[in-house]
Amino acid sequence: MMKSPTTNHIPFGVFLSLLSLTVCQTASAKSGAVDYSWGADGLAEATSFVGTMMIYTVDILYAVAAIMVIVSALQIYIKMNNHEGDITKSIMMLLGGILFMIGAMIVMPAFFGYQNMNFIF
């Protein structure tokens, strides 16, 4: 005759339940004794570092945008002199790139919560 599988596992299930209760109590007992105030200075320093680097990144984006505009304008000028047919496409790509760079330079500081926007304009 076979025994029912649940009859052998009832004491083991009770043991697991009691063990899980003691583990939860042990873990929650340590949560009030941890002091997290030591990280506040590090977070403040990281915030100021991100704000500073963001200003330099926007300046680099200005330089990259200026180089892109000069190169694209020269490409359009060469295409106009050679009477190529896709001049409008090149002009539209140049305008789209300019609009994207302007948008990225405005959105990036706003994404990081930088309030002083005087450096953009």
Image: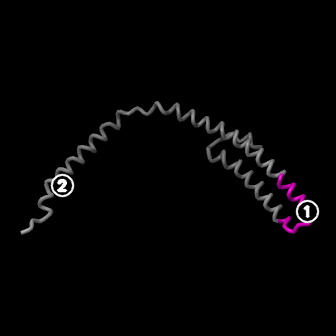
Residue located 74% across and 43% down the image: 120
Check disc 1: other Cα within 10 Å, few if <14, some if 14-19, many if 20+. few
Is 111 placed left or right of 71 in the picture? left
Q: What is the x, y in percent for residue 41?
A: 52, 31
Q: Looking at the image, which is closer to me, 6 or 26?
A: 6
Q: Looking at the image, which is closer to me, 108 or 80?
A: 80
Q: Residue furthest front?
A: 82
Label 1 residue SS:
helix
Q: Quadrant of the C terminus?
A: top right
Vertical placement of residue 60 versus 68, above or below: above
Labelled disc at residue 13: 2
Q: Which residues are magenta?
A: 71-88
Check disc 2: other Cα within 10 Å, few if <14, some if 14-19, many if 20+. few
Labelled disc at residue 80: 1
Q: What is the x, y in percent for residue 74?
A: 87, 54
Residue located 62% across and 47% down the image: 111
**Is 92 covered by the magenta stretch?**
no
Q: What is the x, y in percent for residue 2?
A: 9, 67
Vertical placement of residue 70 versus 78, above or below: above
Q: What is the x, y in percent for residue 26?
A: 27, 40
